[in-house]
Amino acid sequence: MPTMNLIGGWLGMLAGVLSGAAFGLMFHNEGWMGGYSSYPRRLTRLGHISFFGLAFVNLFFAATAAQLNLSGIYSSVASWGLIIGALTMPTVCFLSAWRKPMRHFFPIPVAAVTAGILAILIGWWRQ
């Protein structure tokens, strides 16, 4: 499972760079997406940075899972929770920037990442 997180982490890094490059083409325009402090622009920035943040979390998991001796259900829940969080957090950020009611989907990535982190900690503690 940690191999999936390793690949997912590096794909997240790539997505962060590419999304930053794409959005960076318009950041010079102060009025873009309603201005720097507008809701859509803030959510777009959050989506961009969440690619990097959750990529790092996945890379850290891949690097430490063996040292923590995680196995079975704890390893699976941790792996999938972190991958699901890395996929859904930027998606919900970008959808929320587009349509404000989409913000109600934020519990999905938050719950996924929380489950992943709790699985790591509980699996390590129960050894």
Image (cartoon, grey):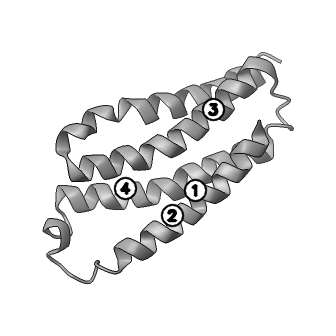
Marks 4 and 1 in Cβ contact (< 8 Å) = no
Q: What is the distance, in whole Å, between disc 2 and disc 1 at their CAs?
A: 6 Å
Q: Is residue 96 visible?
A: yes
Residue 24 image offset from top left, x and y in percent: 37, 77
Q: Which residue is mark 2?
A: 16
Residue denoted by label 4: 46
- The N terminus - image quarter: top right
Q: Is residue 88 above or below residue 7?
A: above
Of the image marks 4 and 2, the number of the one nearer the N terminus: 2
Viewed as shown, does residue 123 lie left or right of 107? right
Q: Image height check: is 72 above or below 60?
A: above
Under mark 1, the amino acid is: Gly
Q: Amino acid at mark 4?
A: Leu
Q: Indicate the secondary structure of the residue bearing disc 1.
A: helix
Type of the residue with mark 3: Trp
Mark 1 closeness class: few <14, some 14–19, many ≥20 residues within 10 Å: many
Badge 3 density bin: few <14, some 14–19, many ≥20, Cα 10 Å:
some
Q: Residues within 10 Å of mark 2 (few under 14, many from 20)?
A: many
Whether the residues at callouts 2 and 1 have beta carbons within 8 Å, the answer is yes
Query: Disc 1 versus disc 3: distance between alpha carbons?
Result: 15 Å
Residue 47 is marked as none
Q: Are marks 4 and 2 in contact (CB under 8 Å)?
A: no
